[in-house]
Image (cartoon, rainbow, N blue to C red):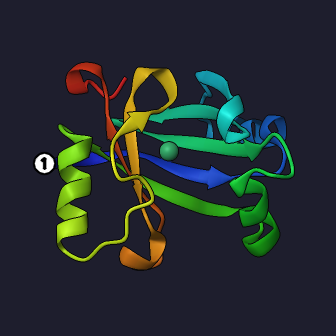
Amino acid sequence: MLSRIDHVGIAVRDLDQAIEVYERRLGLRASGRERLENEGIEIAMIPIGESRIELITPLNAQSKVEKFLQDRGEAVHHVAFATSDVGASLARAAAAGGQLLDEVARPGAHGTLIGFVHPKSICGVLTEFVEADGQSGS
Ligand code: CO
């Protein structure tokens, strides 16, 4: 059901500065930027092979990413797996005792469907399932 790592999410304080770090120090190129107002975050995607780095910065003090940065500082925030069926992946995790943060799939960035599993259920790592249109991982 899970096919590959879709992206690794990294919480950053300053999105412009973080993009510059990835572009200048690693020679990668950021491709898409998107403000997700209802989640209080802005993200930038950096393609790498069949995966991406997702840089995430909070837009306001209420954002969960703001709390994460206060607790942990800039760090890996979550790992996202591509799946053919977010709902089925969530159900599988729950059936095996995992604590879900999303009971059902919900809309994510760029027309995807997403769902999260609590980090304490997956070895301390916030875990995301992503289902892209046509599973192309676009
Ligand atoms: Co993500």
Compared across the picture, whether 31 is left or right of 88 comes to right
Residue 67 appears at what percent x and percent y?
76, 63
Mark 1 close to ligand 1, CB under 8 Å? no
In this rendering, the count of numbered labels is 1
The residue type indicated by label 1 comes to Met
Quadrant in which the C terminus appears = top left
Most extreme residue toward the front is 103
Q: Which residue is mark 1?
A: 1
Label 1 environment density (alpha carbons within 10 Å; few <14, some 14–19, many ≥20): few
Residue at position x 25%, y 66% in the image: 94
Image point (45%, 68%), residue name: 118
Which element carries disc 1, helix, strand or loop? loop
Q: What's the residue at 67%, 44% (across, down)?
A: 56
Is 41 in front, or is 76? 41
In which image quadrant can residue 100 be found?
bottom left
Q: Position of residue 124 (x, y in %)?
A: 47, 77
On screen, residue 47 versus residue 60, left or right, reads left
Query: In the drawing, does residue 34 fall left or right of residue 97?
Result: right
Q: Nearer the viewer, residue 134 or 32?
A: 134
Q: Position of residue 45 (x, y in %)?
A: 57, 32
From the viewer's side, name the closer residue of 17 and 65.
65
In the displayed image of the protein, which residue is found farthest to the left? Answer: 1
Q: Quadrant of residue 11?
A: bottom right
Tell me what residue is drawn at x 81 percent, y 39 percent.
59
- Dividing the picture into quadrants, the one containing residue 73 is bottom right
- The image shows residue 23 at horizontal and vertical percentages of 68, 35
Examine the rendered structure and indicate whether residue 116 appears above or below residue 19. Answer: below
